[in-house]
Amino acid sequence: MRTRIIAFANQKGGVGKTTTIINLAVCLASRKKEILLVDLDPQCNATSGLGVPRKEGGSIYGALLGNGSALDKIQQTKVRGLSIVPSEVDLAGAEVDVPRADRYLHRFHEAIAPVIQQDRFDFIFVDCPPSLGILTMNALAASHSVIVPTQCEYYALEGLAVICRLIDQIRTGGGSTSLDIDGIVMTMYDGRTHLSMEVVEEVRRYFGDKVYGTVIPRNVRLSEAPSYGMAAVEYDPSCAGAKAYKKFADEFLRRHAKREAGSTTADLADQVQAPQTEKGHDVSGVTSAEPT
Ligand code: ATP
Ligand code: MG
């Protein structure tokens, strides 16, 4: 089975989970990867951000309760190579209904099992809501790894400590025994403030090379793109945010190629290839808050 399931999770709201998943998914699709994005957030931001119309009964909600599977819900997006299981507000009911079901932590895994069996996708990306509720727990229990988008702000480390504890609990509790942090991606970096730099350095001190070398700048284009139903990498490919996400996609693929090759060595290639500060993070072209 080649399909890797990766959850994009952080219990904090508004840290860039959806922006990261959309832009990474579109970048990878343009590099000939087959991607399925599952929008597991009742806010439906990934669905609308990709210009996919919401329709009643279109989400994975029914499949979580044993009615059909995610296979029936897959839609092609406007982007070649990128499919989606969209969200719908009915997913909000899952927080109440799923805990009453048998094997309530494994409902998502069971719902996507037929998709995995098809072996059609290289990656299944799961956009989680901003909570550690039943939807996020289900996503983590079904995933091989987690990407944790983390905003460059003061409480970043506290937030990371919480999600790391949960990942440990799921691993040791048998939810997904190999669940690991794929990486932490620092978002909304503001090169005009010392705080952003200090936060990245502190997170890097604790998490080392788990932190992606690419840092995503604060960039207004990234926040404009969803209102056009497009990823920023399509809406304005030359803006600083889009360039950063393209670099991030390169780095993601390098990491995965290494993982597949069974390499366990530190990511030296990233450190050599990416222009970096002396502290080791890639902030090339990130000097002001709003470069476009
Ligand atoms: P939620 O927890 O509500 O699901 P989220 O973690 O998915 O939020 P996003 O929706 O990606 O976060 O981003 C929150 C807001 O910040 C959105 O309006 C988005 O357009 C904007 N945003 C995300 N990343 C950036 C960035 N690097 N620069 C500027 N704005 C950004
Ligand atoms: Mg979101």
Image (cartoon, grey):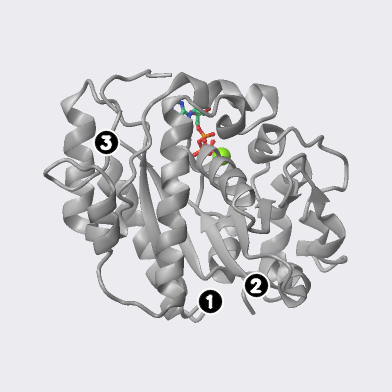
Disc 1 from disc 3: Cα separation: 36 Å
Q: Between 221 and 137, which is closer to the camera in this rendering? A: 221
Q: Between 132 and 59, which is closer to the camera in this rendering? A: 59
- Point out residue 167 in the picture as x, y percentages from the top left corner: 42, 66
Answer with mark 3 or mark 2, whichever residue precedes in sequence. 2
Q: Is residue 75 above or below residue 14?
A: below
Task: Name the front one of labels 3 and 2.
Answer: 3
The residue beneath circle 1 is 175
Q: In which quadrant will I find the N terminus?
A: bottom right
Disc 2 from disc 1: Cα separation: 8 Å
Which amino acid type is marked by label 1? Answer: Gly
Q: Residue 268 lies in what quarter of the image?
A: bottom left
The residue beneath circle 2 is 106
Q: Residue 259 lies in what quarter of the image?
A: bottom left
Residue at disc 3, secondary structure: loop
Residue that appears at 43% across and 78% down: 261
Residue at disc 2, secondary structure: loop
- Point out residue 282 in the picture as x, y percentages from the top left corner: 27, 42
- Point out residue 240 in the picture as x, y percentages from the top left corner: 41, 27
